[in-house]
Image (spheres, rainbow, N blue to C red):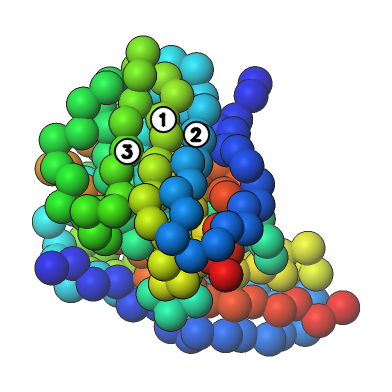
Amino acid sequence: KQEVTQIPAALSVPEGENLVLNCSFTDSAIYNLQWFRQDPGKGLTSLLLIQSSQREQTSGRLNASLDKSSGRSTLYIAASQPGDSATYLCAVFGGGADGLTFGKGTHLIIQP
Amino acid sequence: GAGVSQSPSNKVTEKGKDVELRCDPISGHTALYWYRQSLGQGLEFLIYFQGNSAPDKSGLPSDRFSAERTGGSVSTLTIQRTQQEDSAVYLCASSPERGLRNEQYFGPGTRLTVT
């Protein structure tokens, strides 16, 4: 059974810092990996999707990498802003009749 | 364009009552998913539809849960004889296709409280 772990569980940094969120998964047989952000009381917003054949994806100040063979992904956030404060979730898709398997998230606070 | 919508946004019900949750996916998306987010369990996958068909219902927590999708669009998740442990946020997502490009777009969720 696929398991997804996110480290750290919580992170608080001053505005302007670059930061890295980590995600690991136990079964490397995935189709893709998706990073989401969730604001309090809201649904999930898709940030980046990396297909299994890709190594990284970039969107603005966000860069996600994927090392499928070692079961790891990182989300890099450059020049953090208070508006980046949210919970960041990593999820993998293994195909078949399954949905996404999620980690428990990293709760990020950017201090102004 | 319009995203995934869900209704109601909040539902409070008494233990033992039945509830119906609705999901309207993004137009043209063939795949639809239901998830549940609770404090103790995180986000868990419940069921997936390709068109109107659900190939595997084993992710549903108990036989009190059922789901259907009609016309390849709207889906309803029904919980019969609700229990307090059913209290959670129920999230729906849709995707244009399965496989490599299975980018899922989520609705705002329905917060269910069973008293």
Mark 2 vs 1: CB contact within 8 A: yes
**Residue B17 visible in the displayed image:** yes
Q: Is residue B13 above or below residue A26?
A: above
The residue drawn where x is 59% and y is 34% is B5
Identity, as a three-letter code, of the amino acid under mark 1? Ser
Instruction: List the residue tagged with mark 1.
Output: B75
With A36 as the anchor, is A55 left or right in this view? left
The residue drawn where x is 65% and y is 52% is B10
Residue nearest the viewer, comparing A5 with A57: A5
Residue A36 x/y as whole percent: 51, 56
Instruction: List the residue tagged with mark 3.
Output: B67
With A104 as the anchor, is B63 left or right in this view? left
Circles 1 and 3 on the same subunit:
yes
> In the image, which is nearer the foreground, mark 2 or mark 3?
3
Say which quarter of the image contains residue A107.
bottom right
**Quadrant location of the N terminus of chain B?**
top right
The residue drawn where x is 23% and y is 72% is A3
Q: Is residue B70 above or below residue A43?
A: above
**Residue A60 visible in the displayed image:** no
Instruction: List the residue tagged with mark 2.
Output: B23
Mark 1 vs 3: CB contact within 8 A: yes
Identity, as a three-letter code, of the amino acid under mark 2? Cys
